[in-house]
Amino acid sequence: MELKARRKLLRFHISGAVIASAWLGSFLGLFVAFAFSAAGGWTAADIWRFPLFIMVMATVFGLPAASLGVLLIGLPLSWLFRNARLSGWFGLASMLIGALAGRLFFHLIDLVFLARTDSLRNWRIDDPGLLTGLFTGLLWFIFGRKLFESAQAHQG
């Protein structure tokens, strides 16, 4: 009975870490991307609308995409490299893989919904997919690390 309760609690914590890293990563990535692209062209009305716009975009579009990325890429890689997932290099790898996956997923969205075939050639530092993936990978590393450390402490 004790083991069943622990597994259920761990599943709850994993889903919370996935959602938190996906939403915060989407928010931060979109915030930085739109701040780069709108630099210099701010009005007083834009300053008040900007955070609300980013929150809506991060929740409606970013959360599902980033959650899918963490579930399809982050969790399997965390399991595959379970012996090294607490080390610092895994955080850097999480950021790089997240940025690449976010950029490719953003290209896929451009291709499917907007029929744009040239978006993969245009890699910019203010790309929303790249930045969202980068921040989501970093936050998954941070939240997942805390989760995996506590799981190892309860096992050992």
Image: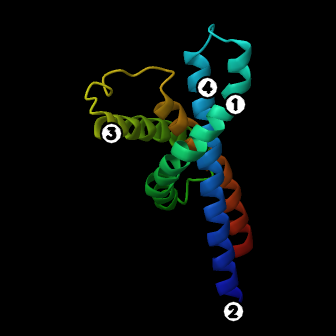
Picture disc at residue 1:
2
Residue 5 lies, with reference to residue 104, above or below; the image says below
Cβ–Cβ below 8 Å for labels 1 and 2? no
Is there any visible trace of residue 138 in the rendered image? Answer: no
Kindly indicate the quadrant of the structure image that contains residue 134: top right
Kindly indicate the quadrant of the structure image that contains residue 108: top left
Q: Position of residue 78 (x, y in %)?
A: 52, 57
Cβ–Cβ below 8 Å for labels 3 and 4? no
Mark 4 neighbour class, 10 Å CA radius: few under 14, some 14 to 19, many 20 or more: some
Mark closer to the observer (3, 4): 3
Kindly indicate the quadrant of the structure image that contains residue 155: bottom right
Q: Secondary structure at mark 3?
A: helix
Q: Estimate the spatial distance between the alpha carbons at disc 4 and disc 2, rounded to whole Å.
A: 46 Å
Residue hosting label 4: 32
Residue at image position (57%, 43%) is 136
Task: Indicate the amino acid at tag 2.
Answer: Met
Q: Earlier in the sequence, mark 3 or mark 2?
A: 2
Q: Secondary structure at mark 2?
A: loop
Is there any visible trace of residue 137 in the rendered image? Answer: yes
Residue hosting label 1: 51
Q: Earlier in the sequence, mark 3 or mark 1?
A: 1
Mark 1 neighbour class, 10 Å CA radius: few under 14, some 14 to 19, many 20 or more: few
Q: Is 130 or 64 nearer to us in this picture?
A: 64
Q: Estimate the spatial distance between the alpha carbons at disc 3 and disc 1, rounded to whole Å.
A: 26 Å
Q: Position of residue 84 (x, y in %)?
A: 55, 53
Q: Earlier in the sequence, mark 4 or mark 1?
A: 4
Task: Indicate the amino acid at tag 4.
Answer: Val
Q: Position of residue 5 (x, y in %)?
A: 69, 83
Q: Secondary structure at mark 1?
A: helix
